[in-house]
Amino acid sequence: MSKSPIRVMYFRNARGISDVTGAESYVFALLQALDPREVRGTLLAAVRPGMTQTPWIVEAKRRGLPLELIEVGSKFGLQDYQCLRERIRSVGADIVHTLDHRADIVGTLAARREKCAVINAFFGWTNFSGRFSRGALYAWLDRRAQARADAVITDSGYMASFAGAGDRRSPVVVVHNGVDIARFQPDTPLPDLRQRFFGRSDVFVFGVVGRVHPNKGQVEFLHAARELAGRHPQVRFLIIGDAPPGWEAYRAEVAKAITDLGLSDRALLTNVASAEIPAVLASVDVLVSPSFVESFSYSLLEAMSMRRAIIATDVGGNREMMIDRESGVIIPAGDISALVREADTLLADAAKRERLGTNARLRVEEHFTLQCMAERTCAIYRELLQARHQGVGRAEARRRVQRLSAVPARSAP
């Protein structure tokens, strides 16, 4: 007789989320990649009242994912806690797998009350500054929740150093993000969007893809664009993404910078549906990631899968993801001169662009597929539940789970 699948309740706080972010990409990938004979997952998400048709929700429905929404009007509301407890009982959840600081806190409390296992997914606090602020408070609270979880899954060795609390009573396990290499397939014919974006298809495009936020460096990208535009009339600059709620002023700043820097006819700030991202990447000659803060970027993984040449800053898990000068080019964060220099080099050297792109795709196929991500995550689920079933002590359970942490495929200082 076959074993019953592990029942996992994924719990996401999406009260401040409208577009598809890294956390959405992560849980979408898991729900699609995990073998339903081994894991049966449901995504429960807390949203603000009326925010039930935002782009990320539309995308989840387009993919046919098992999504349930809870409307929570106040950050102090308890509707999600009460609903999560009810859903844990109704589906007989074995594990609650949480995403986001509020979800970690609420999910850990609910899982402990219902006596089921809890795993926190941790991608860093990438929307906040390091000053004493709301972000600092969230980070402090999140670490308290992580200390009570059965395990903390993070997507890079870099971010693992920020997870946990105190003596890290919960094991912190690295599982690198994975990308759907069938969806991001460079040999599949895709529409060339350059004509739509710039009115002509014979242009060279540097592109930035991701949420519009100060930590993503879009303004710095535009300052580099001004220098490049003066020397290369055939070059265009594309910024794809939307601002998270509360960061609309920064999006307005990026739009104003395009005008102030004299780039109105050369640069475009816009957004597209998630389904069009493969075509966007196919229409970009070089993908630029000028971020100041990163975890393990899905945008970079997707660009690597599409065989794009990449210029990325030396932040987060980027050195775990790519090998500098072999499968991407890594520059110091905030160094506009370095960005201009490397952009000039790639613009002039088609063979280098092709080599970087080819190596990037091969690296994804070897280390960062959905299957790799799903298998490692499922192994953590099994190990955790087996330890609980056997009643082993916390220290031994921690050792068992911790040994499943992925060693970065290659990292450099």
Image (cartoon, helix red, strand yellow):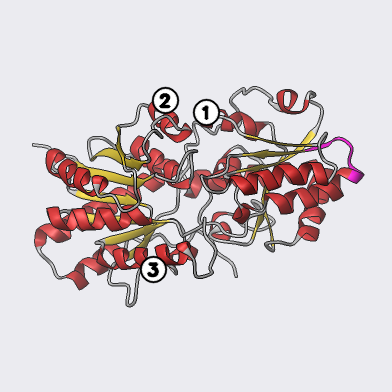
Q: Residues within 10 Å of mark 3 (few under 14, many from 20)?
A: few
2 and 1 marks in contact (CB < 8 Å): yes
Residue type at the position of mark 1: Ala
Mark seen at residue 81 = none
In 3D space, how far apart are the residues under numbered discs 2 and 3 (Cα atoms)? 36 Å
User: Which residue is tagged 1?
Assistant: 275
In percent of width and height, residue 280 lies at 63, 32
Image: 237 above or below 378:
above
In percent of width and height, residue 30 lies at 36, 41
User: Can you see residue 116?
Assistant: yes
154 relative to 88 in the view: left or right: right
* Quadrant of the snapshot with the C terminus: bottom right
16 relative to 251 in the view: left or right: left
153 relative to 192 in the view: left or right: left
394 relative to 315 in the view: left or right: left
User: Which residue is tagged 3?
Assistant: 140
User: Can you see residue 402?
Assistant: no
User: Which residue is tagged 2?
Assistant: 62
Q: Residue furthest bottom?
A: 167
Residue at 42% x, 29% y: name it. Answer: 53
**Range shown magenta:** 230-236
Residue type at the position of mark 2: Arg
Of helix, strand and loop, which one carries label 1? Answer: helix
